[in-house]
Image (cartoon, rainbow, N blue to C red):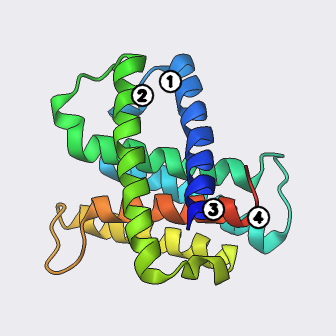
Amino acid sequence: MQNTLDSFTNILTNCREVFVKKTKDYGTAWRILRPIALADQLYIKANRIRTIQENGESKVGDGVEGEFMAIVNYCIMGLIQLNEGNQLELELSLEKATALYDKYKDESTTLMLKKNHDYGEAWRDMAEESLTDLILMKIYRIKQIDSNNGETLISEGIDANYYDMLNYAVFALILRNVK
């Protein structure tokens, strides 16, 4: 389990570095996104991964690794928007954005450890394609919950789907041996 924690932490550190650099470049323009727009951004990334997996090549040159990292970052942005969005100004300082990122990064790590314990690292025996399909399924769930005005009768909410997609994306990167 320690190897998983180390790998998980390293990948999240790399994703955080990308988030910080993009925040320096673009500010927190992502704060304008409504839940459905975030779901669509996640869909674009996951669908591109699936297309590359099925076709065996990328014609634009960007790799699958960057798309999985983008999924991680969009999930954290989604969690920030969902849980903190109404209380925040549109443009956040780099320090505030990074502190919020770290909060949800840490929560996702804690959740991963709990689930990894209960599921016995089953993800290690899964195909990357399965993880991609699970991410796509979670996106469709978010879209359905959004069309139900955020309400569910018995199912987990949008936040649980963001955490699951984040974890699946990190697991895919671990399986790809991304450091």
Chain-order first, disc 1 or disc 4: 1
Q: Are marks 2 and 1 in contact (CB under 8 Å)?
A: yes
Residue at (68, 79) in percent of width and height: 127
Image check: 166 left or right of 143? right
Mark with earlier residue (2, 1): 1
Residue 164 x %, y %: 42, 66
Of marks 3 and 1, which one's residue comes earlier in the chain?
3
Q: Which mark is residue 47?
A: none
Q: What whole-number distance in Å separates the C-alpha atoms at marks 1 and 4?
A: 28 Å
- According to the picture, the residue beneath numbered tag 2 turns out to be 98
Mark 4 residue crowding within 10 angstroms, few (<14) / some (14–19) / many (20+): some
Give the secondary structure at mark 4.
helix
Q: Which mark is residue 3?
A: 3
Choose mark 3 or mark 2, whichever is in front. Answer: 3
* Between marks 3 and 1 in the image, the one whose residue lies nearer the viewer: 3
Q: Amino acid at mark 2?
A: Thr
